[in-house]
Image (cartoon, helix red, strand yellow):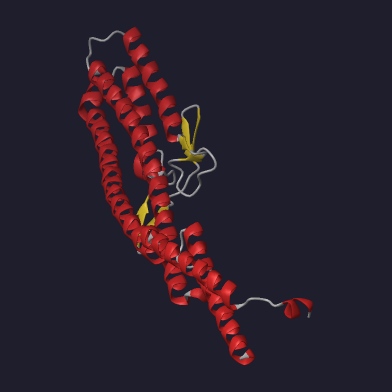
């Protein structure tokens, strides 16, 4: 009889311990909201969760790269818009000055305005975004353009800043000075500046034939190149916007997949917890009846 009672007590204790473990496991899941809290519980689920988290982090990095690139492209486009406005003003002054009836005072005033526009063009060539110069190629830390009298210098290079925007693709983020303002033999990136000097001097000299015959067409060519560069920037920006939308959709899918792997079903688990709690309470009541300590057990 003692052996039977002892076996019954051991069985009740073992079952009560198992019930407590199950209830504790359910409580842990409910409090954390996660199916697995340690790798030993489900190595496959943990491995899958880690892979999805890594994919999500990679996508977030690409979105960040796209945002940085778009910001750079937008800043460049705004600057090129200002360059276009400046060149349009130069064109108007060329047309105004291509007239033999202009007085020397008028020509001098217009030439002085062109000279000031040249100063402004140097400022636009040195525009910054986030502390880096837009048109210096790889040399983004120092102003790429300088003017000393009628001499212009380009201290940048022809470097292309490629930004990684997807696992297998990069996008050119910048327009370097040589592509925008043209090259001269031995003097890269300054052709446009010296051409506007010619415009200034032709206006000052009253050379209407040169202004209307060649310089007006050359100013138009310069403007066309700026517009081409802006169109290229726009195409890149459109591509990046499309990529950003794609990564946004991928992020939603990855988060949904990770939620299926990691997150619990609250309604189902709460019901299971209540059931397990009832079972545990019943096991306690059973234990109280089966494991009744005698005075001799208490004294020993």
Residue 214: x %, y % from top left: 23, 31
Residue at point 34% right, 30% down? Answer: 83
Side of 275 relative to 40 (left or right): left
Nearer-the-camera pick, 292 or 241: 292
Location of residue 58 by image quarter: bottom left
Residue 69 visible to an observer of this rendering: yes
At x 56% / y 79%, what residue is drawn?
12
Quarter that holds the C terminus:
bottom right
Looking at the image, residue 136 lies above or below residue 257: above
Question: Picture coordinates of residue 176 (x, y %)?
Answer: 40, 45
Give the image quarter of residue 87.
Answer: top left
Q: Position of residue 88 (x, y in %)?
A: 27, 25
**Residue 185 shows in this picture:** no
Q: Is residue 49 above or below residue 84?
A: below
In the picture, the quarter occupied by the N terminus is: bottom right
Query: Looking at the image, which is closer to me, 73 or 36?
Result: 36
Q: Is residue 250 above or below residue 113?
A: below
Q: On the picture, is 272 further left or further right than 7?
A: left
Name the one closer to the observer, 215 or 242: 242
Quadrant of residue 8 within the rendered picture: bottom right
**What is the count of numbered marks?**
0
Furthest-right residue in this view? 299
71 or 19, which is in the foreground? Answer: 19
């Amino acid at each position: 009889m003692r052996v039977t009672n002892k076996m019954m007590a051991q069985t009740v204790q073992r079952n009560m311990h198992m019930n407590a473990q199950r209830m504790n496991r359910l409580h842990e899941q409910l409090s954390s909201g996660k199916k697995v809290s340690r790798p030993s519980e489900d190595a496959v689920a943990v491995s899958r969760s880690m892979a999805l988290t890594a994919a999500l982090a990679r996508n977030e990095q690409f979105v960040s790269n796209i945002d940085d690139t778009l910001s750079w492209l937008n800043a460049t486009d705004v600057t090129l818009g200002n360059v276009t406005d400046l060149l349009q003003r130069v064109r108007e002054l060329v047309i105004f000055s291509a007239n033999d009836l202009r007085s020397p005072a008028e020509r001098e005033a217009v030439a002085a305005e062109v000279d000031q526009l040249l100063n402004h063009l140097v400022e636009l060539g040195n525009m910054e975004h986030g502390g880096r110069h837009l048109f210096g190629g790889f040399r983004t830390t120092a102003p790429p353009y300088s003017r000393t009298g009628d001499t212009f210098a380009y201290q940048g290079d022809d470097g292309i800043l490629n930004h990684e925007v997807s696992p297998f693709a990069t996008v050119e983020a910048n327009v370097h000075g040589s592509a925008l303002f043209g090259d001269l033999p031995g003097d890269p990136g300054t052709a446009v500046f010296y051409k506007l000097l010619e415009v200034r001097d032709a206006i000052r000299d009253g050379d209407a034939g040169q202004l209307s015959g060649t310089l007006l067409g050359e100013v138009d060519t310069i403007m066309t190149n700026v517009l081409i560069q802006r169109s290229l920037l726009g195409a890149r920006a459109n591509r990046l916007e499309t990529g950003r939308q794609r990564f946004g959709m991928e992020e939603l899918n990855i988060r949904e997949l990770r939620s299926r792997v990691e997150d619990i079903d609250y309604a189902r688990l709460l019901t299971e917890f209540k059931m397990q709690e009832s079972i545990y309470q019943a096991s306690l009541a059973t234990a109280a009846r089966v494991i009744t300590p005698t005075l001799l057990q208490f004294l020993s």
